[in-house]
Image (cartoon, grey):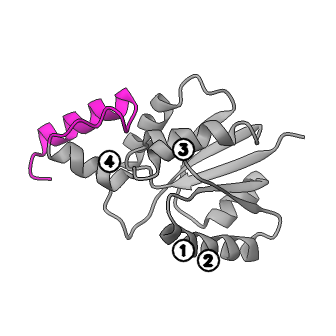
Amino acid sequence: MARLAIYPGTFDPITNGHLDIVRRASGIFDEIIILIAINVRKEPLFSVEERVRLAEAALSGNGGVTVESYAGLLAEFARERNADAIIRGLRAVKDFEFEFQMALMNKSLYPEVETVFLMPSEKFTYVNSSIVREVARLGGDISRYVPPPVAEALARKFAATPDR
């Protein structure tokens, strides 16, 4: 029986740190769904459709990995897909408290699912989407932090909206 994991996040945009987590999770799980979360409390730079397209482009050639979006409870999505696990990345100790609470809530809502915490490789521990967006907005080189399609999309986005 195939083991299915869900890797949820805003992915605004997907970074090489995210891809590192996916690569390592692929060694544990047979199938992974990258779940682009729709969070009404956040104002993402990229639309849901753009984030899905960027994630798909970044993950092309990764068999067993698909990209979807969802606006509801993660536990409900996991139940609908009969997922075995939820993957969460931990970059620093400050991430743990929030992630631990979310894991317990998801377990309470869907007892059959486990949360698996993975740390990114050392070279990605300081990389997150917010920092990448800010560096890109200010014209910095982000090529080490994101796949080429994402770097190109950020360049286009900030060329079109320089005040953002």
Query: In the rendering, at what x and y percent does residue 148 appear?
Result: 36, 27
Q: Which residue is mark 1?
A: 98
Distance from the alpha carbon under mark 4 to that under mark 2: 28 Å
Camera-nearest label, 4 or 1: 1
- Secondary structure beneath label 3: loop
Query: In the rendering, at what x and y percent does residue 25 appear?
Result: 68, 42
Residue 121's disc is: 3
Q: Taking 160 as reference, is 26 left or right?
A: right
Between disc 3 and disc 2, whose residue precedes?
A: 2
**Residue 157 on the magenta span:** yes
Q: Which residue is mark 4?
A: 46
Query: In the rendering, at what x and y percent does residue 153 appear?
Result: 28, 34
Q: Amino acid at mark 3?
A: Ser
- Rendered position, 103 above or below 91: below
Distance from the alpha carbon under mark 3 to that under mark 4: 26 Å
Between disc 4 and disc 2, whose residue precedes?
A: 4
- Secondary structure beneath label 1: helix
Q: Taking 29 as reference, is 87 left or right?
A: left
Q: Looking at the image, which residue is at 63% across and 73% down?
A: 100
